Image (cartoon, rainbow, N blue to C red):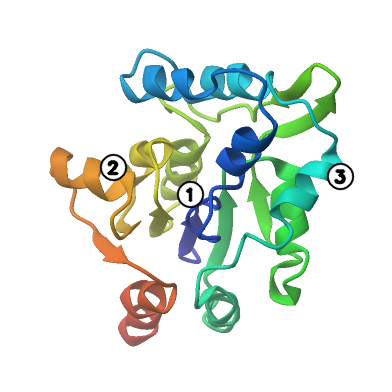
Amino acid sequence: MRPVLICDFDGTIVSVDTGRLILSRFADGDWQQYDDLYNRNEMHVEECLRHQFSMVRATKKSMIGAIEESVPLRPGFERLLELSDERRVRLLVASYGLDFCINHILGKVPQARDLRIYSPRTRVTPSGVRFTFPRRRSKDSLNLKDDLVGFYQHRGCTVAYVGDGTSDFPAMEIADVRFAIRGSRLAELCKNGGVQYSQITNFDQVAEGFIRPLSQNR
């Protein structure tokens, strides 16, 4: 089976969390209180997002406009896409971000236009953003990210994961190869939880740590 590389989007593929940017600009209320509940394990990530984005009062066009000029790709991502294709590594995106923001940003990257993205479906309404979350394949999965890692592992694939946040931790715990953005919440959780991982600042380090060694072992 082809090896698999799964990447988070917000704070990982792009260096800014687009969801938090949109909440800080358009949410009508104290959305951060739900972050506190989530980080204390008193609320699931999906419930947290439902509460937070129900406060957003904006059109899809205005939200895309807010991220248009302020969300750069992390260095090395475009080269990673090319190298993954050359070395026959399946690269996927797993995100709890807004699907239309992810599609807008990645749609500008020619190498990413056929990239598979696993994320909630969103609907923008006058009373906030509504989510439809993907159905998990395993009842033991904690969220869509570890569910995706487990799915490919059960098919016999070696799976690497790259992320930066709290929702990435369940996937990191079970991935075969692990990368966390340096200084991120995920790096802190891995360190405190005794989970071995590599800290990175760009995707060239992922290529060196996962993709190139694969070709040497074949």
- Circle 2 packing at 10 Å, graded few (<14), some (14-19), many (20+), is some
State the SS at label 2: helix
Q: As displayed, is residue 103 above or below residue 29?
A: below
Of the image marks 1 and 2, the number of the one nearer the N terminus: 1
Q: As displayed, is residue 109 above or below residue 183?
A: below
What distance separates the C-alpha of mark 1 from that of mark 3?
A: 35 Å
Where does residue 55 sit, x and y in percent of width and height?
68, 20
Q: Which residue is mark 3?
A: 61
For marks 3 and 2, give the one nearer the viewer. 3
Where does residue 120 sit, x and y in percent of width and height?
67, 34
Closer to us: 43 or 152 = 43
* Residue at x 41% of width, y 48% of height: 153
- Circle 3 packing at 10 Å, graded few (<14), some (14-19), many (20+), is few
* Residue at x 58% of width, y 57% of height: 92
Q: Give, as a three-letter code, the residue at label 3.
A: Lys
Closer to us: 180 or 155 = 180
In the drawing, does residue 98 fall left or right of residue 20?
right
Q: Which residue is mark 1?
A: 152
State the SS at label 3: helix
Do tag 1 and tag 3 residues touch (Cβ < 8 Å)? no
The label number, if any, that marks residue 11 in the structure image = none
Where does residue 15 sit, x and y in percent of width and height?
50, 60
Q: Give, as a three-letter code, the residue at label 2.
A: Glu
Q: Give, as a three-letter code, the residue at label 1.
A: Tyr
Q: Which residue is mark 2?
A: 173
State the SS at label 1: helix
* Residue at x 57% of width, y 84% of height: 86
